[in-house]
Amino acid sequence: MLHDALKKWFGFDSFKDGQEAIISSVLNQTNTLGILPTGSGKSLCYQLPTYINQKPTLIVSPLISLMDDQVMQMKLNGETSVSCVHSGMDEQERQFNLSKIKSSRFIFLSPEFLLQPFNIKLLNHLDLGLIVLDEAHCLSEWGYDFRPHYALIGKITRQFPQATILALTATAQPYLLNDINHMLNTKFTEIKTTMNRDNISLSHLNFDNDEGKLSWLLEFIQHSGPTIIYVSSKKICLTLAQAIYKEGYLTGIYHGDLTYQERHTVQHQFINNEIPIIVATSAFGMGINKKDIRTIIHFHLPTSPSSYMQEIGRAGRDGEMSQAISLYQPDDSFLLETLLFTDSITEDDITLFESGDLIDPIKLEMLTILNDYYSLNELITIFNTAYQRKQIAYKKMIGYKMLDSCRRQFLLNYFGEHDITKPVNCCDNDSELKNLAIYNRKKVKRKMNYNEKLQNLFN
């Protein structure tokens, strides 16, 4: 039956690894955590059950780019019964999508939108068959100290007890299953395939300073193919992009402070190979449907193996050989620790919050949101646990820079994977890796469009 439905709705003859098991679980009305590597067709795991059950599906999504990409892909495949509301839309587009919600088969919304009382009422009369928590690792990584509304996701799911819940992600920390069971006060069945992407080679380089890194980078990108370079901050993003552009390469920047239109433009240019290189913070990547990214460079190490696996997973979605290279210099450790721990909420912050004393406004806002769902004692436990997890993840990444054994084994062990078949091009510690040689052309003069030509005539 499932294979017939797959052929009918999507024209495919067979499922990818993990898809059939997840879909069967959902159709049996079992709340399911599905863990599939990037590019393995996670969206099919909720689209096919939606067509089979003929009931609307709510997709709770963390990022605008992710929603936009999935909506665009659906529409390209002929699906018109889809609505999406997010902060990047103008008022006319927003109102149009709001008016479509009650008649839509697929509804894409953010947790922040849904947790506004008036907005959740838009769904009250819908017989939802499925609620999808997309990029579910964000529940653990962001749900308390970055996107607190994610930690309140149980408020949404409780309002639709008839709906099956499907949480989807490409990377799952060892504690993710317990976290979402706790957040949603339910029990999920976990279905997991390997997180190993054997077409991505792993290597690492240590330098004495940032000048050494930059010198290596400017030479390396000549032949790196479509490339994302991840950095730790907006400031470094701008500085590095300027250096690359000065070297002669068309380069895009991407960080959280750009407007929706700026982010959309950069994504479009990168996807269409108008620019070969993106310099970005971790805000870039999810929802970017570019299959031929060949190189991921971390100018700064990420703060956890989960972040690293997510970000390098954006390479080689076409199955072709790709490479992930991380860089480090001694001052980076201070930078990473600052990013991780400076703004962390502590037990002292919660005590100040309880007594009504002065507290950082951002922390005050987050604790106010969370305290609506969790007791203060629960929050103390939650943030103490989060701090310990950050320390463990950070130490794991610091260990990665000095590793003399298999990098793939080291990373996957963190996620509980121990029986690993190593590819030929595995990592720089157990393979004779050769860097890819895909030429990136230097910038060319852009052709003026019609309006620009007119403007030049009259200036």
Image (tube, rainbow, N blue to C red):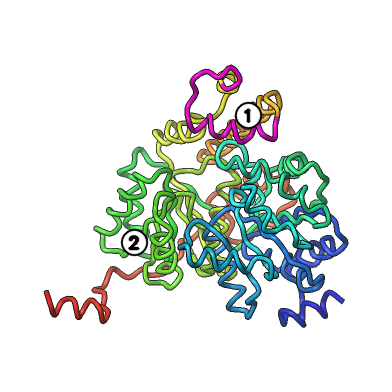
Question: What residue is drawn where x is 76% and y is 39%?
Answer: 182
Instruction: Give residue 103's quadrant in the image.
Output: bottom right
Q: How many numbered marks does the figure carry?
A: 2
Q: Circle 1 sits on which residue? A: 383
Which residue lies most toward the left here? 459
Q: Is residue 26 left or right of residue 260?
A: right
The three-letter amino acid code for the residue at tag 2 is Thr
Q: Position of residue 214 (x, y in %)?
A: 32, 49
Label 2 CA crowd tier, 10 Å (few <14, some 14–19, many 20+): many
Q: Does residue 356 sit above or below 67 in this rendering?
A: above
Please give the label number shown on residue 81: none
Question: What residue is drawn where x is 50% and y is 23%?
Answer: 359
Q: Position of residue 200 (x, y in %)?
A: 56, 60
Q: Does residue 344 sit above or below 248 in this rendering?
A: above
Q: Is the C-beta separation of discs 1 and 2 under 8 Å?
A: no
Tag 2, which secondary structure? strand
Q: Position of residue 386 (x, y in %)?
A: 63, 32
Label 1 CA crowd tier, 10 Å (few <14, some 14–19, many 20+): some
Question: What residue is drawn where x is 30% and y is 43%?
Answer: 211
Magenta stretch bounds? 353-374
Instruction: Give residue 321's quadrant in the image.
Output: bottom right
